[in-house]
Image (cartoon, rainbow, N blue to C red):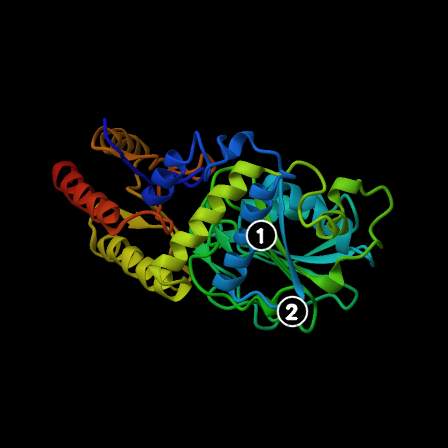
Amino acid sequence: MGRVYNFSAGPAVLPEEVLKAAAEEMLDYKGTGMSVMEMSHRSKAFEEIITEAEADLRDLMGIPDHYKVLFLQGGASQQFAMIPMNLMKNRVADYIITGQWAKKAAQEAEKYGKVNRIASSEDRTYSYIPDCSDLPVSEDADYVYICENNTIYGTKYKELPNTKGKLLVSDISSCFLSEPIDVSKYGIVYGGVQKNVGPAGTVIVIIREDLITEEVLPGTPTMLTYKTHADAKSLYNTPPAYGIYICGKVFKWLKEMGGLEVMKERNEKKANVLYDFLDQSKLFKGTVVPKDRSLMNVPFVTGDADLDAKFVKEAKAAGLENLKGHRTVGGMRASIYNAMPMEGVEALVAFMRKFEEENL
């Protein structure tokens, strides 16, 4: 069987060109006679890989010089603890709850201090982004935390919250590199790479230098202190070396594609094909308030759980994989990250149209 269209939310589709290039180098990376998987993280060859990956990411995102880029492990979920351990000097933080991952991050932060949930969309199953123009930001808050694109619920902040001068911390796992962002608006912006950037096992943290200090909460492990990794240039211990190598290849692919402005246009076109169909469909409907829709994750339902299950099963047989919605919400979800080609979205819509005709 050939390649399928993989709509998984993560680990997710990677660019075919990247996989082919990695396959060619699998046994012998650039004449070293070994795979990157076998290579010492202290070797000159790997030093070049990680240095180039960081340079390309800085270039793509326009990361200012006074921000550090860290390639870490533990996924986004480990950052739920690392952020309060390093930033909660006053032991107070404000969280905006727009889905399961922001909710989990807030619960984790409560182990270290007081968490104020200053806005939430839980009342309507996270189907919208709350108005964040005039929030009750706490005077003594160390930071305001958001999850910018909500993978499960398919919502996305179209503008950042007004934090009233407080530090903004953002989890961008599922919209990473899908469009340009202004890094200088954040104190920390981070993401697990397994959705839009690379293989599972790596998390990238972009952090303003003044936030990297030795003044962390008592008992913070060495490995969970940003300064440890910043001082060692992400090589304090063995990093997720192969994951970083693939991320580096994805960065090069993005640059070849024309950068993040071009990706944003491509992603908007792809998403519009699917949303336009959903908006006129008599069987399927999207679950998100239109103005807050994500370009990356598109949840939809028929309104009938049995029909949803039938759709997922028949779609799989047609080579459209991983369309089942997250277990907490049911229905379907198409994740259409950077590496999903337009043909994949068009194939999905054609299948949905046929399914609708057969099942109405």
The residue tagged 2 is 163
Label 2 sits on a secondary structure element that is loop
147 in relation to 326, above or below? below
Asked if residue 91 lies left or right of residue 317, the reply is: right
For the residue marked with disc 2, what is the amino acid?
Thr
**Does residue 212 appear in the picture of this structure?**
yes
For the residue marked with disc 1, what is the amino acid?
Thr
Give the quadrant of the N terminus: top left
* Residue 36 x/y as whole percent: 51, 35
Considering depth in this image, is 216 or 276 the residue closer to the camera?
Answer: 216
The residue tagged 1 is 51
2 or 1: mark nearer the eye? 1
* Residue 60 x/y as whole percent: 48, 62
Considering depth in this image, is 335 or 24 the residue closer to the camera?
Answer: 24
Q: Quadrant of residue 27?
A: top left
Label 1 sits on a secondary structure element that is helix
